[in-house]
Amino acid sequence: MRILAIETSCDETAAAVIENGRRILSNVVATQIELHERFGGVFPEVASRQHVLAIRPVIEQALEQAGISAMGALDALAVTNGPGLAGSLLVGVNTAKGISFTSGLPLLAVNHLEGHIYSNWLAEGTAAQPITGEPLDPDRFPILVLIVSGGHTELALMTGHSRYQQLGSTLDDAAGEAFDKVARLLELGYPGGPAIQRAAGQGDPTRYALPRPLLHNRDHRFNFSFSGLKTAALNLTRGLTEGDEPITEQMKADVAAAFQAAAVEVLVEKTADAAQAFSAQQVCICGGVSANAALRQAAATRMAQLDLPLHVPPPFLCTDNAAMIGAAAYYRSRAFPHSEAELDLDVFANLPLVELQAAA
Ligand code: KG4
Ligand code: ZN
């Protein structure tokens, strides 16, 4: 089954062609990073306008790279309809509806968070974007899932394909949001996550002590909180810049390293705790923050101690892309046949992952 997938939920215009949920025939991502850099974050109006300009060439490129010359060579269309920025989502959804209407291809609506989860199922890349690493067992459940992105931080138990039980989430900021905000306060550049990772590489994570929010809080065993950690990093930085002396590059690197170490420890320990508590057979980490080298390393060490198979996608599949949307659409359509979307499909800025289970 070949699916053309479209993703425009935030600031990447993306299209991909995916075969049987696991093989990438093409994966095109047009990033808007340069456009939003001067605002220090995603500017929604600018994002949706840029999607309008980019969507057609991106889809054409994805079809061409996959060797698809006619829509008849495809079996379905998939599109993200939430969560995300409403104006951005609309561009992808309206484009997909148009193609579905003219081609007659069935339209599959995909939750962006479920897309991130299924980035772990993509097992075969292209020559330009190879996928290596320990293969996931595609049908071995339960799987403990940690989603860490710019908008979400969720722990969920996946009991079967497209079936989720939510265990916890962030009470305030998402992990990626905290990386972005701390990078901004340290003036490290945009986007914040990679900037923090770079600076932290030059820093000493033990020079300054930062808190591990909710780490041992039994009432919030599977929840997270990153707002206090961000404020602690802010206060630490302010303390360092008191007086006339400007903050040095080394101090910035040490704050970045301390922040990254605190965030990573909480994410990894709570994931390990949940995996044990629910007897998970495999662990998957996904979302933009899972591109973080320190998180990948710490998670690999911890899960190896527990003898648990860990899967984290290659970095190009951690951040937003359409390949993951095609993978999720394939498995969802198999788990729930006849779940095609109608042409009145709407977008939902706050679509939760568990609502999928209730609707199913
Ligand atoms: O999944 P994603 O591309 O978009 C959302 O769905 O939100 O995630 C973007 C987030 C941003 O906050 C970005 O700073 C973070 O992922 N990120 C990273 C790294 N690369 C991207 N955070 C930490 N380390 C990285 N290397
Ligand atoms: Zn995302």
Image: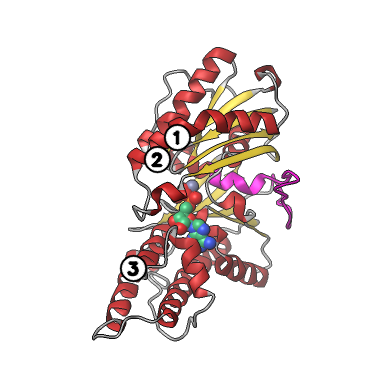
Gap in angstroms between the C-alphas marked 1 and 2: 6 Å
Residue type, label 1: His
Rendering colour mode: secondary structure
Residue 288 lies, with reference to residue 352, above or below; the image says below
Q: Is residue 122 magenta?
A: yes
Furthest residue in direction left, as rendered: 243
The residue tagged 2 is: 47
Gap in angstroms between the C-alphas marked 3 and 1: 29 Å
Q: Residue 306 location, x and y as percent?
A: 64, 69
Q: Residue 99 location, x and y as percent?
A: 54, 19
| Region in magenta | 115-139
Residue type, label 2: Ala
Q: Quadrant of residue 302?
A: bottom right
What kind of element bears circle 1? helix
Q: Quadrant of residue 225?
A: bottom left
Residue at 58% over, 14% down? 104
Mark 1 and mark 2 in contact? Answer it, CB < 8 Å: yes
Residue type, label 3: Leu
The residue tagged 3 is: 185
Q: Is residue 138 magenta?
A: yes
Quadrant showing the N terminus: top right
User: Around disc 2, counting alpha carbons within 10 Å, would you say few (fewer than 14), some (14 to 19), or many (20 or more)?
Assistant: many
Per the picture, the main secondary structure of the magenta-coloured stretch is loop
Residue at 43% over, 52% down? 152
User: Around disc 1, counting alpha carbons within 10 Å, would you say few (fewer than 14), some (14 to 19), or many (20 or more)?
Assistant: many
Q: Left or right: 283 with respect to 8?
A: right
